[in-house]
Structure formats: C-alpha cells, structure tokens
Image (spheres, rainbow, N blue to C red):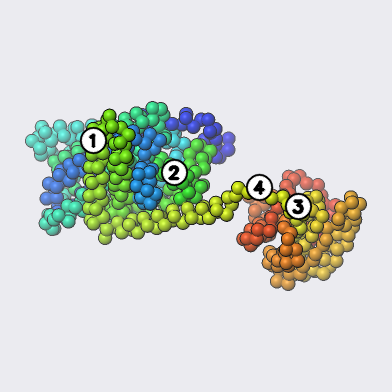
Amino acid sequence: MSLWNLLLGRQLATREQSERKFGVGAGVPALGLDGLASSAYGPEALLTVLIPLGAAGLRYVGPIILLILALLTILYFSYRQTIAAYPSGGGSYTVAKENLGTSAGLWSAAALMLDYVLNVAVAISAGVAALVSAFPSLQRFTLPLCLAILLLVAVVNLRGTQESGWAFAVPTYLFIASFAVVLATGIGKSILQGGHPRPVVAPHALPEAAVAASVWLLMHSFASGCTAMTGVEAVSNGIGAFRDPAVGNARRTLTVIVATLGLLLGGIAYLCHAYGIGAMPQSQPGYQSVLSQLVAAVFGRGIVYYVAVGSLLSVLCLSANTSFVGFPRLCRLIAHDGFLPYAFTIVGRRLVYVVGILFLTVTSALLLIVFGGITDALIPLFAVGAFLAFTFSQAGMVVHWWRQRKSTEHNSSRVWGRLAVNGLGAVATGAALAVILVAKFLHGAWMTVLALPILFLLFRAVKRHYLRIARQMRTRKPLDLRDGEPPLVVVPTVGWNKLIDKALSFAVRMSPDVISVHLSDLEGTGADERSHTLRKEWTEDVEEPARQAGLPPPRLEIIHSPYRKFAEPLLDFLERLEARHPDRSIAVIVPEVVKRHWWQFLLQNYRAEALRSALLRKGDHRIVVVSVPWYVEEHAPPLLGTSPGKIPGPGIQILNQ
C-alpha cells in the first residue's frame, strides 16, 4: 500500500459520490461542531469583557445571553426557510448574488471566507486552552499543539466528508452527553440549595469591581458573546453534503444543532451566575477556562471532570471541521462563477475539493502563528464576517419572498409571513453587526474590515483575468487552413546523442526546414574543438542519412555564447529568424530527459525547463514549443567506445543532464 493510500485512503470513483453523503447522525458532527463548540468560547468571550466589573459583572450575564438566544431563535427560523428555498445550497453567497446582485454576493462571500478561516483558528486555540486548563504544564506548547491539531483535522477532511462526519461523531455526542449531565446536575444542586450551591472545587476568585458598568462595556460583552452563533449558517451552505431528502435532513440537523446550542448557552449562563464563575486572561499562569471551572465546581476534579473536559477539548479542536466542510464548497461556487481560480473546483482523489482544504489549512496556520494560538487575541476579529454574511443572506431572502408573492397568490399570507421572518432576521443581524463593529473595531475588528475590500477586489481581478482570456480565445470563425506551409523547426543542442537524434528525426518529419542550433562556449573552455568535432559528426551522421532518405538535410547553426548563457542567445537567434521569415511560424523542439526519481532532480540541470519557460514568457504567438522526452532505462548498456565506469566527455551533453 502506498503512503498516500495509507494516509488518505484509496482513490474514489465519481460514481461513489452519493455514497459519501451523510444524514442527520453524521451531519450534526460534520456541520454542527462549530455551533456546539461556540458554547465554550462564546460565554467565555462575553465574561472576559466583564472582568473589570468583578463579581458584579455576573448579574449581566443572564440578560446578555437571553438577548443572544433571541437572536439565535430568529436565525434558526430564517435559515429553515433558506434551506427550503434553496435546496441545492442556500449560503449567503448564493442568496445575496441571486437577489441583491453580484457585488452583494461577493461581499457576502468575502465575509464568509474570513469567518471560516477565523473559525478554524479560534476553535483550535480554544480547544488547546481547554487542554492547558486540565494540564497547565502544557501552556508553553500552546502554538505547536494548535498547529498539530490543525494538521490532523486537515488530513481527516482530505479523506472525505463521510469519514470526517463519523470520525467526529464520538467526541461530539460524548460532549453533548457529558455537559448534559454536568448542567443538569449543577442546576439540580442550585435549585435544592436555594440558588446558592456549594462548589466542590471553588472557582477562581473574582476581584472587586474596577469600573462601573456602562452601555459601552455591555455592548462590547454582547458583541463578544455573539461569537456563539457563528456556525449557524453552515447547514444551509452544506445542503449538498446530505443524503436525500436533503432538505429534510438539513432542517432536522439545523434543529438539533440550534436546540442543543441554546440549552448549553442557557445552562452555562445560569451556572456561572449561581457558582460565581468568571473568566481569566488566557496568558495568566494557572489559567482555567470558564467551563473547566464550571465542571470542577459541580463534580470536582475526578473522572467526570476529565471525561467532560476531554470531550470539550475534542469538540473545540475538531469544530474546525465545520469550516473544512463549508469553506471548500463555498470556494467551489465562487470559482465556478469565475471569481476564484478554477483550481478550487477540482475534485480530488477522495471526492473533496483539495485546493480549498489546503488553502484553509495554510491561512488558518498563519493566523495561529501570528497570534500565538491565543483565543483572546483572535476573538476581536471574529463574528464580523459571520454577521455580515447573515445580514446579506436575510436581506436577500426578503427580496426572494417579495418576488415570490406574485407567483403564489393562493399562498400570499404564507409568503408574507416568510418575508416578515427574514425581514426581522435582516434587521436583527444588521443591528448586531453594527454593535459588533463599533465595540470591536479598535480591538482588532479593523483587520477584518480591511481584509473584506481586499478580498472583494481580488475576486474582481480574477474575473477580469478570465474574461480577458475568454475574449481573446473565443471565436466562431471557420478553421483557417489557407496557410499550409510547414513551420520552421529549431532544435537547440549542446552536443550529439540519442536524444538529439530522436528530436531531429521527429523534426524532419514535421517540416523540410529544420535548423539545429548548437551553443558553444557553455563550458568556458574547449569550444572550438567541440564545434569542429560536431560539424564533422553532423555531416556523417545527419546530413548524409537525410539525403539517402530523400529528405532535405537539417542545417547546423553554431552560436557562440561568450557569457555561458543558454536561453538568451537562442531567443536572439529566434528573433533574427522571425525577421527573415515574417510569414512563417516557428516550432522549437525542446529535448529533455524525464526525471522519474527524486535524486534525478538533484543530478541533472534545468536547462530544458528554463528554455521552455523563457520561450513561453516571450509571448510570441508565432512560436510553438514542442517537448521531446527521453526516458532513462534503469539498466542501460555501456556507452559505445567506453569501458564501464569511464566518464563520458562533453561531446554527449544534453540540455538537462
């Protein structure tokens, strides 16, 4: 078994595509990990902003979470409608492009791409933070751990969507079950003890208030807490990954994800207030995450703690999988419309969009490296892209239903109801976006705001490039065969050997006008002697056999290269040839040895590749480049006239020996 098959699995046929799709059971971990895992870093981000309020800040946690849950409910009903309206995939890009125009779609696409990349970085850094909470000695390895987990998630996704869905199912459902037990037990204890439960392990002591609560501080806290909703759109983006009935499976998956997330957020907010649990700066020695403190307060640091925190670690780290499912599909849609390189549309060996996965891996790794794998440093950049995409999607759906009202008069009341739901979603997410931008701008959101127009301009530049190529290549004219004169054929050589023999044999069959160009002085010494030898061999071994075969003999041109350059003298010769024959095309035959093993790349030079590249960069429409390969035999016989082990002289050099 090859290394690739061992690492990525066997290559899949296109007909196996339907077999790789999943249902609700695998859909929740594949597309819901982002939303579920955000129940860890969303409340923590909210509480981090409230640190200056000390213990007094806990009284605001409940109202802020209720506001977030209300917004989550609006988004849930809005995206249920989007899934039904766009069964082939109703992401923000598609909805905005079809209903608000191409520009709106591209802004939405840029926002979503940034959100997906940031989700990977935030999720993995938060997962490592959970690991460091359980094992503080690992804090100094934060960044290497982040990068190792990122690599693991990327490899699993390169194996295909089904593997990624079921590979993450066990930790996902273990996380849900563990925290269901923790939250139910903690709430039960709180009720039995009059709302003031005694913690098994006391949480981090909260300081006295350093500042008074202000609208600005609470806005900032709400903006940070909104990161808990960033994964809601993933299901509508990934409808194509579901088995039939895709719409029904997608809706049920969305329901499970949102209901579970809502219960987790509500339970965490209640227990944080009941047990007096606040956030700690992640860079502080002895750092403990909010959920680590919560589980320890309810159960202590026994087996339940390590199972719960272990499942939390797994879900947080693997929640990046949501982006690995959604990001390549989004890039494929954008590339299909010509706004990203077409490489993003290519399906790899495991029926996944490999270029999208690799691009997401590299950009996420760069973010983790720049910010040191610290979640608190990444959070301010987060949520802007998600809520901008939410707003475009909801506004696009409003236009969609407005257009539908005339074609469905018998259900006009239903259409108006749907329009109202998406209208409310547009207003709510737009207002939340404004709060997030204002509250987080100076804390890092400005980088996201700056990146958005850069991506937008990049999309436009790619599209202009493809349109320019299409305009130049498109034609409806009949094939023009009036100019039937064969091309001038040029064969560059640095010696005489079987490869040149093969190239010349091919050349004389193409055209009666063949010129072999020999470059002397490349080695710096002995040029005259080699040129004289070559002229003699040429007469005997090339011209005479050609005459006997009734073919015009190829001409030999010897060009001196006093500065030992290879491509430049050839280009100069071609320019002179074009000037003498303005109505002829020129075919340049590039003979080269095929490199099959890694060591051959080290032992051979790259003259053939350099010449081909120089000819292509020349941009001359009259020049055609033809490659003539030579395959080296593993057990070749000794050279004629030499003994085994004798090094051949310069007379048998080849372009890339």
Residue 329 occupies quadrant: top left
Q: Nearer the viewer, residue 414 or 335?
A: 414
Crowding at mark 3 (Cα within 10 Å: few <14, some 14-19, many 20+): few
Residue that carries the numbered disc 1 in the rendered image:
417
User: Which residue is more in the foreground, 161 or 587?
Assistant: 587
Q: CA distance from mark 2 to mark 1?
A: 30 Å
Q: Is residue 55 left or right of residue 539?
A: left
What distance separates the C-alpha of mark 4 from that of mark 1? Answer: 56 Å
Can see residue 169? Answer: no
Residue type, mark 1 in image: Gly
At which x and y percent is residue 32?
Answer: 33, 37
Mark 4, residue position: 478
Marks 3/2 in contact by CB < 8 Å: the verdict is no
For residue 333, which numbered disc appears in the image? 2
Q: Is the C-beta separation of discs 1 and 3 under 8 Å?
A: no
Please give left or right for residue 199 compared with residue 376 in the image: left
Which secondary structure lies at badge 1? helix
